[in-house]
Amino acid sequence: MAGPPFVARWLLEHAIEPAAAEAIAGDLAEAYQLRIARGEAGTRARLWYWREALVAILWQWRGAPRVGESAAGRRTMSDTLFTEVRQTLRALRRAPGFSLGAIVPIALALALATSVFAVVHAVLIRPLPYPRPDRIVHIGEHDAGDRVGTIGYATTVDFREKARSFESFVAIRGWNPTLTSPATLRLSGMRVGAGYFSMLGVRPALGRDFTPDEDTPSTRYVVILSDGLWRRQFGADPNVINQTIAFGDTPFRVVGVLPASFEPVISSEFYTAAEIWSPLGYALDGDSSCRSCRHLHAVASLVPGLTPERAQDELRAMRAALAKEHPRDYGSDQVSVERISDRIAEPMRRPLAVLMAAVLLVLAIAGANAASLMIARAADLEHEHALRAALGASTGQLIRQRGIEALLLAATAGALGLAGGSLLTSWLLAQAPSTLPRADHIGVNGSVVAFVAAAVAVLTAMIALLPALQGFARPVQAAWARARSTDSRGLVRAREALIVADVAIALTLAIGAGVMIRSLDRLLAVDPGFVAADVHTVGLSLVGPRWATDPPVLAFQRDLETRMRAIPGVQSAAIASQVPLGGNYDRRGGYLEERNTQRAEDGIEFERYSISPDYLKVMGIPLLRGRGLSDADRPETTPVMLISDSAARQYWPGQDPIGKR
């Protein structure tokens, strides 16, 4: 017949006086065997034994009246505990070297762990602010190397009407309008299919949502504002609903204002954080609605109980059928379905996990260091403990005092670490890249405080438990004998074990740091093909009837470049439709002249930059062969273009690309 849990019996026998432990252990073992004999499940019986053993240990440590005894007795226990805390504080003040040696490393490690956990919680743990975040997925067509995952409008219509895996399905795109009335302001926004906000479970705080009738090319001129834009530009006017605002010479009507709690995490992932929304307003016969015009993203809500993998299988089967029906419009790309939460967190998951593991190891080293100091201190106080035991102090009282000491050390370090972590988190946010997802939620909050509290609890146990069990859970005679020796064998073994653990963890961290430094050095050595140092950018948008044709736009751009070059300190200036790694995309499709079969599999796709002649000079991009653009390359002359070295090697391997079309 199985006996009581070994760890519980060992703890009971070593945590309290031997005589009491022997009597309690015998009673509990007899009761445990009786429960087993009556047919009680082994797991339930072991849990009962654990509970009773811990209760017995606690009562022995307290040395206080049990339930039903006088309130005066309970106050005595409280007074005793308060007295022990004061005595422990005085003892720590008398040993400043020991106190600082234990507190400072833990506080520094906790500050680092707090700041990293704040980032991990906001990016990886905190759920998206929607009622059903696990059912919101992104759908896109892309190959293995294209994470953007855009899709054509006609394809989204087929998926929305025929797929059975989704409760709702909408297409979205970025939108950067320039507000011209009642103020002049360039905004970040989105154009979304009707049902976008209802799919997310969001209702406007003022006004209403878009209606399906407004999601057409002729009726799409309505907008919903973010709470921040409404307060900043419209003075939180509740009468803003049905007011008309203008983007260029196009009027739009305000139909809603979103609640302040709404987070535009989806727009932040694909574009920039949106503060204004308008209906998508596409039709199947529109210029941008072709199947091969892949510039939209699709977001959908899964049917309850369905996984993204099953939805992906359905869409891939549908796309294969569409490719047979429209062979010129579909290549070898595949459809992917992934949760929005996974898509947002995935790029940061591995680096943040590695970083969190590293700081936890540092915290473990700090805790092991404090435990080593506590063991050394226990050896120094061996004579005092033996004397107190001889005068009647119980083992529980001695262990409790060491526990209070460990708790005070860990709690002080925790408070300092929390304060330092808050400052470090603010500094990290100031240095973080703009692409860090959900950065506005990074900070010291309730979850971060709970993490620090849990770390303090673990550190307290780590600092106090091993020295207590090694140094104090012995009879008085053994304690007195150890006090007269230089050191106890148990304490020596404990310190040796902690030293080995310290060295092992430190070696692991050193190896990991070396690998990371080597990887970072290699990354910094990669030549991106351009020079970003001292290059500054500014965005502009020309709206209104004055800029409806190309000649005034070109004249303005040339004049702007001339004025920018005249600014003191400016070496060169250029205009471009986008900059490398700027987050914009202008993908175009075409065919090579020598194999222009008009078949989808023979088509090529490339990223297009529209630039003025000095762009290469500003960006420090070398010209490998041929010539650059010049002012002589005008709209009325033969169209010319530059291609990248990788495009030349891909499309004309082993050939001279100059002169190709």
Image (spheres, grey):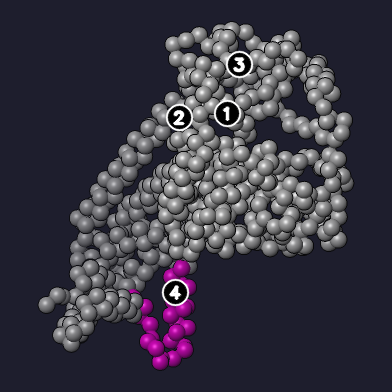
Mark 2 vs mark 1: which is more N-terminal?
2
Amino acid type at image mark 1: Gly
- Tell me if residue 84 is in the magenta stretch: yes
Which mark is nearer the camera, 1 or 3?
1
- Tell me if residue 253 is in the magenta stretch: no
Quadrant of the image containing the N terminus: bottom left
Quadrant of the image containing the C terminus: top right
Region of the chain picked out in magenta, as a range: 61-85
Q: Position of residue 12 (x, y in %)?
A: 24, 73
Name the residue that disc number 4 marks.
81
Residue at the spot 64% in from the left edge and 55% down from the top edge: 196
Amino acid type at image mark 2: Leu
In this rendered view, identify the residue nearer to me: 418 or 545: 545
Amino acid type at image mark 4: Leu
The quarter of the displayed image where residue 610 is located: top right
Label 1 Cα neighbours within 10 Å, binned few <14 / some 14-19 / many ≥20: some
Using the numbered discs, state the Cα–Cα distance from disc 2 to disc 1 in whole angstroms. Answer: 36 Å
Q: Position of residue 513 (x, y in %)?
A: 39, 35
Which mark is nearer the camera, 4 or 2?
2
Residue 421 in view in this figure: no
Assess whether mark 1 and mark 2 are in contact (beta carbons under 8 angstroms). Answer: no
The quarter of the displayed image where residue 209 is located: bottom right
Using the numbered discs, state the Cα–Cα distance from disc 4 to disc 1 in whole angstroms. Answer: 78 Å
In this rendered view, identify the residue nearer to me: 522 or 138: 138
Name the residue that disc number 3 marks.
642
Residue at the spot 65% in from the left edge and 14% down from the top edge: 640
Name the residue that disc number 1 marks.
589
Q: Secondary structure at mark 2?
A: helix
Residue at the spot 61% in from the left edge and 52% down from the top edge: 170
